[in-house]
Amino acid sequence: MPASDSASRLNFRPPTPGEELIRFEHLKKAFGPKRVYDDLDLSVYAGETLVVMGGSGTGKSVLLKCLIGLLYPDAGRIHFQGQDLTDFDEEDFRAVRKHVAMVFQGAALFDSLTVGENVAYPLREHFPDMPRDEIARRVAEKLSWVDLPGTEGMMPADMSGGMRKRVGLARAIATDPEIILWDEPTTGLDPVTTQNINTMINSMKQRLGCTSIVVTHDMLSAFEVADRLAMLADRRIVQVGSPEEIRHSQVPQVRAFMEARRTELGIGKVAS
Ligand SMILES: Nc1ncnc2c1ncn2[C@@H]1O[C@H](COP(=O)(O)OP(=O)(O)OP(=O)(O)O)[C@@H](O)[C@H]1O
């Protein structure tokens, strides 16, 4: 990546597969009386797809937002390639967001801009000197990756929810980020579009070699994309493990969560 990170304290280097890329350490966060994390620890390794699961309101989205500086933890540390982000300011986080892209729950597109302009937006923001034809080339490439080739001139309002979600994804990956944060990528989508999104999460890993953190309560989707899964409950991460380890978990909160979703997963009783 060209170094327009220079105004930032972020010292980014291309990740080595398997290195500890991100570490949340003793994180605490509350909103007034509502405690979200008391003491949360979690590591993310380069090249993996880590799914964070947990019930509604347990703080899955807040975790992603803390990583890119949209929210700040009250205590604890977030390390990115060993660098402490805790005292980063907005300018520093702009550089983080060049490498860490978030695909928001709603597509969060700019309705007054065309699809092409939406996808070009982060390129103009992070690479102000990029020539127009290179921007157009990258926009066309990303739209074809999400199966929407040639839709540059369309307006978001004229698209279905699933299409808008895919435009949101094309925009998130426009800068070829090393890390993609997926906030409930399949919520509210029909089964076919859900399957497309799962395929896309897996193909981003092949195409960009990127690391993904996926926040979801869609367990079918979770097991389809995860290398590891982390369970958020009781204001902390109660277990992290491989899909097999999670399926056979003895941790009560994980068992209860899986049990409640076993119809969704098409499995019998959770293994004991
Ligand atoms: N900016 C904010 N101000 C006040 N409270 C907030 C804010 N953001 C999140 N919260 C609260 O923090 C808690 C965790 O929110 P979060 O969005 O992370 O949950 P979640 O696990 O992603 O839930 P869901 O699966 O329903 O999206 C919730 O109680 C939420 O209301």
Image (cartoon, rainbow, N blue to C red):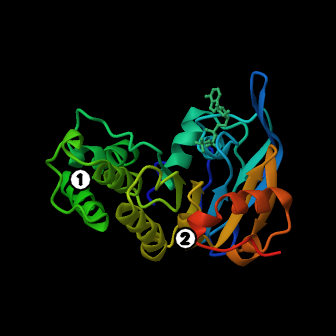
Q: Is residue 239 left or right of residue 70?
A: right
In the picture as drawn, the residue positioned furthest to the top comes out as 32
- The picture places residue 190, in percent across and down from the top left corner, at 38, 57
- Seen from the viewer's position, the closer of residues 141 and 51 is 51
Which mark sits nearer the N-terminus, 2 or 1?
1
Q: Residue at x 25, y 66 (%)?
A: 144
Q: Quarter-wise, where is residue 266 in the image?
A: bottom right
Badge 2 amino acid: Val
In the rendered view, tell whether residue 267 sits above or below residue 30: below
The mark total stands at 2
- The picture places residue 23, in percent across and down from the top left corner, at 74, 56
In the rendered view, tell whether residue 255 sits above or below residue 59: below
Q: Quadrant of the N terminus?
A: bottom left
Badge 1 amino acid: Pro
Residue 23 visible in image:
no
Which label belongs to residue 225?
Answer: 2
Q: Which residue is mark 1?
A: 131
Label 1, residues with CA under 10 Å away: few <14, some 14-19, many ≥20: few
Q: Quarter-wise, where is residue 251 in the image?
A: bottom right
Q: Residue at x 66, y 57 (%)?
A: 52
